[in-house]
Amino acid sequence: MSEARPLLLMDVGEALDALEAHGGPRLTPRGYELLDDGRIADGPIQRLRHAAREAARRRRWYRESERELGQWPVVVWPGEMTAAGQRPVPPSVVLHDCGDAMREMHQSLLPHAAAFAGTRLQPTMSYGPRLYRRGSVLLMHVDRYPSHEIGISVVLSGPRWEMHLVDASMARLQPASETTSEHTHILYEGCRMMHGCPTPLRAQRVAAFFHYRRCEAST
């Protein structure tokens, strides 16, 4: 398992082209569901939260260079959803020294991901924990196929943040939205659902991302 940043898309048309190119199926009726803390094994998430707190306290993090940050494209959205992506935002950082806790959490979430998808899955990539600064946004994107067919976003600390989701497979341009928090996480079809948090974050937040693919998915 390795780390990878998501594929950012310039517009909805490019998202639809990507979906058509890889031919990924619609695995679930809605494309996403919420995952409450009460359904998650307590040990792994508490150990990951502890590791993330310690890494942040010791300032053990990696920050992308200005050159790398400048390569991230702005996502073009209708109406108010363009505003957050049109100005510089505070850089987020990836916390170090959390590898063992991330691997444990990745495996512990596998049954939830498989039940959501309705098929056998294998873990592929994990990303984070990522520390988002006040004012950060997460631009709308779809994830890489096939390694990111199913994603789980786990909130380790910080305020509630609204995630927007659009079913690209149905060309629906009206997004759904769900609010995630330390006690409410989200599973989603990463290659089907355009997703992101375009509203600027009001306080620091730490999250981790876990990805899976179907055992029979084509490459």
Image (cartoon, grey):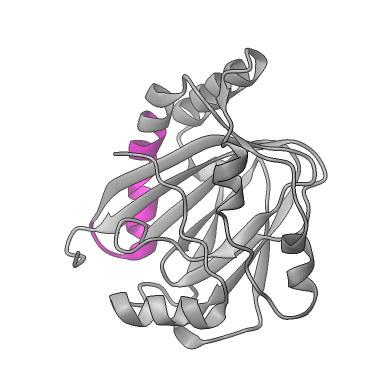
Magenta stretch contains residue 125: no
Residue 9 at x, y percent in the picture:
52, 68
Query: Which of the image's four quarters has the C terminus?
Result: bottom left
**In the picture provided, is 36 more to the left or to the right than 112?**
right
Task: Tell me if 196 is positioned left or right of 98 in this view.
Answer: right
Left or right: 77 in relation to 169: right
Is 116 a magenta residue? Answer: yes
User: Could you say where residue 140 lies in the image, as x and y percent from the top left?
Assistant: 60, 65
**Along the horizontal axis of the image, is 44 left or right of 156?**
left
Quarter that holds the N terminus: top left
Q: Is residue 164 above or below residue 205?
A: below
The quadrant holding residue 198 is bottom right
Q: Residue at x 50, y 44 (%)?
A: 39
Which residue occupies the foreground of this view, 23 or 161? 23
Q: Residue furthest front?
A: 67
Q: Is residue 144 above or below residue 52?
A: below
Q: Nearer the viewer, residue 11 or 26?
A: 11
The residue positioned 31% from the left and 56% from the top of the image is 147
Q: 213 or 108: which is nearer to us? A: 213
Q: Nearer the viewer, residue 44 or 156?
A: 156
What's drawn in magenta, residue-wise? 104-120
Residue plotted at (48% across, 40% down): 40
Chief secondary structure of the magenta portion: helix
